[in-house]
Image (cartoon, helix red, strand yellow):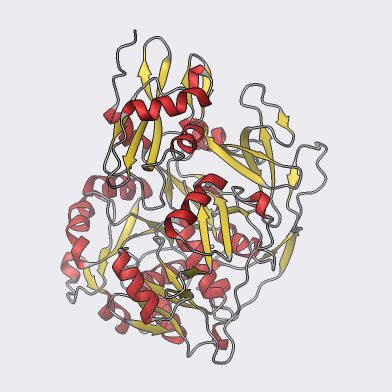
Amino acid sequence: MYMNGALIGMNGQAKSYSGSGNASTNIVESPFGDVNIPEQTLPQTIWKDMNEWSDMPIITCGSTGRSYKYSEGRFISHSFGSGLLSTLKLKKGDVVGLLMPNIPEYVFAIHGALEAGLVVTFVNPLYTTGEVKRQFENAEVKCCVTIPQLAEITKAVAPTLRNYKGTVIVGGGETDPSRKIFDFKTFILTQRGDAPFPKISPDDVALLPYSSGTTGMPKGVQLTHKNCVVNLEQCKHKSLVNHVPTAGNYQEKVLSVLPFFHIYGFNGILNTIMIYGMHMITLPKFTPEMYLEAVIKYRLKLNLNSGHLQQIYVTKIPFSQLKLNLFRQNYTIRLQHFHQCYGMTETSPCTLLSPHNMPASKVGSCGQLVKGTKAQIVSLTTGESLGPQQSGELWVKGPQIMKGYLKNEEATKETITEDGWLKTGDVAYYDEDGYFFIVDRTKELIKVKGNQVSPTELESIVLQIPGVADVAVVGIPDILSGELPRAFVVRKARATLTENDITSFVEPRVVAYKRLTGGVRFLDVIPRNPAGKVLRNELKVFGEKAPQQD
């Protein structure tokens, strides 16, 4: 889970989507109104205003300094799409796999493929050969775009794929059609650009990112052009964003760190940057040193002398008032704006955003529903729709919701109801002002003798202990109780905390079944994925056996 052949300037008609008219008073609707749905494909939307900033930079590699203008990016994208059709003989609907870090050519490869009527699936470049193979086989990938450092993976995977057409390597310098290997630069420059592009409908599938959803193995999420385009439109509201479109010599710069293979990194950041004509700085990998060097070199909106960070966005991770206070204490910064967002791969990704004028009392909320979106909180026990201040599973509905899971009708039906509600798998509640608060994941809830225990609740308590740098709580199997809560704790430097220090602090603050009866283990680091989510399954490997009970 978590988390925006057409010619330049082609505009389609638009229609409105409204979530009004529900009989239930427990269905919450966006305070920002309906959304205007452009009848456009994603490439049409991305490039439609390009002529206004064609000579301005679109993207620069913060590591190498390699940079492209919008006009160059448009040419490369179109030429790449043409080559996929004419040289590799791909057909509309074929799947292209991207196995790359955040580099400038990623942008042109993905939008070139989409313009050519192809479907793109992106893969974490840290994946093993086996993980790439499973995704590419399931998606039926016909072509892969990668870099020399990862070419051995595609070399191993390609023979297992049916009707595989070829591998395009960015920076490879080698072209050998007999081995189905093509250098990206040569591939672009040898195109005549006159290959006929197929007609694309906004309802055609554009992306195939993979998500575990609420349960099970990763599944291909079918996102249409319309899903992505409408989500970009849903987030356009003066209360939610304050981007200034490029005009004259003015152009905003944005340092993009979140991976493009993540739906928020792609549609929420990359595509948003492009529709406003902003200048994107990318890093192929994140290190604090590379990040700070890029901030200084490109004069981004961070004043290091005053310690003044203007804006922070937090996505998908429950961020309480307590965590914000700890953040401020640890980094001694003065925040002008602190924003939380909420979304899923299955929702393209955004459903909730915190507005700029959000009251301080709402800190910890992931915001309000974006335009044209509605939600309800459903009881985990009765299935009833709940009112304010009551926790249950968050269900959302809107035009940004996926078409379904690839080749998995059963999982699709389990996730999306017959009347279009998507079950997020997240436990949440909302207040009387329509602000939503994420409590936990339903699949991460720990079941102790039938009682539901929230890992996030226990984590927030443990974080109050001086000397605790990080914590994650998981359930470990137990014959009598079903599961027991176990805490994995990272100590701060020079801290000498013991297991008893942790358990004795938690014990008086929770009911008996929520206590850390599964024990405490100390780690050097909590395992997290690139989006910052705790890899709880990895932690459970450390605790497959619970301690003996007295």
Q: Residue 1 at what x, y percent from top left?
A: 46, 46
Q: Is residue 336 left or right of residue 207?
A: right
The answer to which quarter of the image holds residue 69 is bottom left
Q: From the image, which quarter does the C terminus lie in?
A: top left
Give the residue drawn at x 42%, y 38%. Answer: 465
Please, is residue 146 above or below residue 436 in the view? Answer: below
Give the residue drawn at x 52%, y 51%. Answer: 324
Depth order, front residue of 525/120: 525
User: How many numbered badges does the structure rendering display?
Assistant: 0
Depth order, front residue of 524/203: 524
Give the residue drawn at x 32%, y 50%. Answer: 136
The answer to which quarter of the image holds residue 34 is bottom right
Residue 427 shows in this picture: yes
Q: Is residue 338 left or right of residue 215?
A: right
Residue 217 shows in this picture: no
The answer to which quarter of the image holds residue 534 is top left
Q: Is residue 532 left or right of residue 318?
A: left
Q: Is residue 444 left or right of residue 160?
A: right
Q: Residue 414 at what x, y percent from top left?
A: 55, 32
Give the residue drawn at x 45%, y 58%. Answer: 93
Q: Residue 353 at what x, y percent from top left?
A: 62, 56
